Amino acid sequence: ALGLPWCTLEPRAGRVASADTLALAYGADGPSARLVDRALVWLLAPAAAEAAEYGSETLRVARPMQARELLSALRRSAANAELLADGGWVDDEDEARVAWAYAQAGRLLRTVAPASGRLRQAFEEGGRSAGDAVVALEQALR
């Protein structure tokens, strides 16, 4: 799991890059949490999901540029150097880092696809509570 409880449900690079958000996440997860990599995967997951559903040529809602925007926003402050280097990445590897994060997002989505299908089915069947849907999801993830 990505473990990003400090993020809102809507991906926005500026919000992820805010000093307060990063300080909170960094303090909670420790110095080797690879927060930037996790945030990049999270920001690119909508694009990976749309590409899997409709093909990579036609993105309808996702904004994959947010991954680059996050890296640019973080690079504006020298205080983020340690966060950016976490995972062994160097400054001129941003494109490779974004490609890696996109691939990880796709892999993660494929891994949880059966669970996602069970959750969708639980909601589509109707007459079930949100709790029943959560149980279906938990059973699928076991």
Image: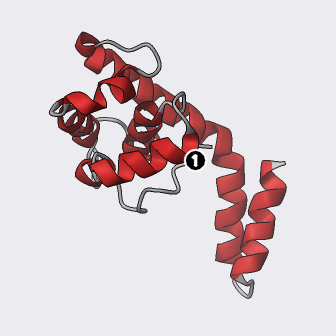
Q: Give the image's coloring scheme.
A: secondary structure
Whether residue 17 is situated above or below residue 20 in the rendered picture: above
Q: Is residue 62 visible?
A: no
Q: Position of residue 134 (x, y in %)?
A: 74, 69
Q: Where is residue 6 in the image (x, y as percent from the top left)?
A: 46, 56
Left or right placement of residue 88 versus residue 119 in this view: left
Left or right placement of residue 62 versus residue 39 in this view: left
Comparing 79 with 98, the one in front is: 79
Left or right placement of residue 61 versus residue 55 in this view: left
Please identify the quarter of the rendering in which residue 130 is found. Answer: bottom right
Left or right placement of residue 88 versus residue 61 in this view: right
Please identify the quarter of the rendering in which residue 101 is found. Answer: top left
The residue at 44%/51% (across/down) is 24
Label 1 is placed on what type of residue? Gly
Comparing 12 with 76, the one in front is: 76
Name of the residue lying farthest toward the left: 76
Q: Position of residue 48 (x, y in %)?
A: 42, 39
Comparing 105 with 38, the one in front is: 38
Q: How many marks?
A: 1
Comparing 67 with 118, the one in front is: 67
Q: What element carries label 1?
A: loop
Whether residue 5 is situated above or below residue 56 in the rendered picture: below
The residue at 24%/35% (across/down) is 74
Give the residue at mark 1.
3
Whether residue 96 is situated above or below residue 101 in the rendered picture: above
Q: Is residue 92 visible?
A: yes
Q: Where is residue 14 in the image (x, y as percent from the top left)?
A: 23, 50
Q: Callout 1: 10 Å neighbours few (<14), some, many (20+)?
A: few
* The N terminus lies in quadrant: top right
The residue at 46%/26% (across/down) is 103
Whether residue 49 is situated above or below residue 107 in the rendered picture: below
